[in-house]
Image: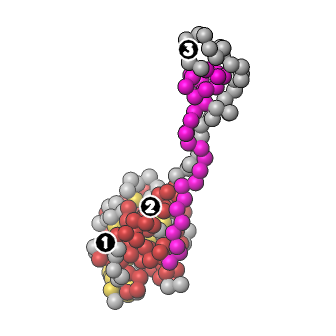
Amino acid sequence: MAVLNVINTSGDKVSEVELTPEIFEIPVKSSVLHEVVKMQLAGKRAGTACVKNRSDVKGSTRKLFRQKGTGRARRGDIKAPLLRGGGVIFGPHPRSYAIRVPKKVKRLALKMALSSKLASDSIKVVDKIEMDAVKTKSFVEIMKTLDVRNALFVIDAKNDNVELSSRNIPKVKVLRADGLNVYDILKYDNLVLLSPSIESIEGRLKK
């Protein structure tokens, strides 16, 4: 069982925490992580692109000129796809790009993502982050003290001061424990967990 030091925002050790091996120390399979990340990214696609077909274009259905005798193509109405302003053939229409992945696979991938961070020594545990007001400079100072860049901060509950203070900092994201996902864990180099959030994560993944 892995044991990590719990530090405060001044960088001093205040306690230790044990991480559940069934969640933070399992073998990592890149194929499982890839499947879930692909599912997440596909779900973000809007799928709202749409073209007008021949039947959707406004225009007369009159035949442009007679069938024979002109030496020209056998043209029908003005809405033909080969004419400027005509309908589009084989163009995109609204659709869903969503991919379905079993719940067990998603839960397994989340465990693997956490395990990969622990294996690469990229997890830090902080007892709490307290901010009296929304101030980006204060949050930057906390990051410097913790010596983290390109980091995902996981908090246990809603905290507007922390979430809003980090919003304008590049390559930093603050996420609540109930919204923890594979893509965000893998996207950032470092994972900073608030001590109370570990209990929420383990409770969610032990089901």
Residue range in magenta is: 75-104
Q: Position of residue 133 (x, y in %)?
A: 51, 61
Residue bearing the label numbered 1: 122
**What crowding class fits label 3: few (fewer than 14 Cα within 10 Å), some (14-19), or many (20 or more)?**
few
Can you say whether 94 is above or below 12 in the image? Answer: above
Sequence order check, earlier mark of 1 and 3: 3
**What crowding class fits label 2: few (fewer than 14 Cα within 10 Å), some (14-19), or many (20 or more)?**
some
Q: Position of residue 186 (x, y in %)?
A: 37, 65
- Is residue 34 found left or right of 95 in the rendered image? left
- What residue type is disc 1 on? Ser
Q: In the structure shown, which secondary structural element does the residue marked by tag 1 occupy?
A: loop
Residue bearing the label numbered 3: 72
Residue 78 within the magenta-colored segment of the rendering: yes
- What residue type is disc 2 on? Lys
Mark 1 to mark 2 CA distance (whole Å): 23 Å
Residue in view at x 40 percent, y 71 percent:
32
Q: Looking at this rendering, what residue extends furthest in the bottom direction? A: 1
Which is closer to the viewer, label 2 or label 3? 3
- What residue type is disc 3 on? Arg
Which is closer to the viewer, label 1 or label 3? 3
- Is residue 138 found left or right of 90 in the rendered image? left
Residue in view at x 39 percent, y 65 percent:
34
Prevailing SS of the magenta stretch: loop
In front of the other: 152 or 144: 152
Residue bearing the label numbered 2: 38
Sequence order check, earlier mark of 1 and 2: 2
Q: Looking at this rendering, what residue extends furthest in the top direction? A: 70
Label at residue 178: none
Mark 1 to mark 3 CA distance (whole Å): 71 Å
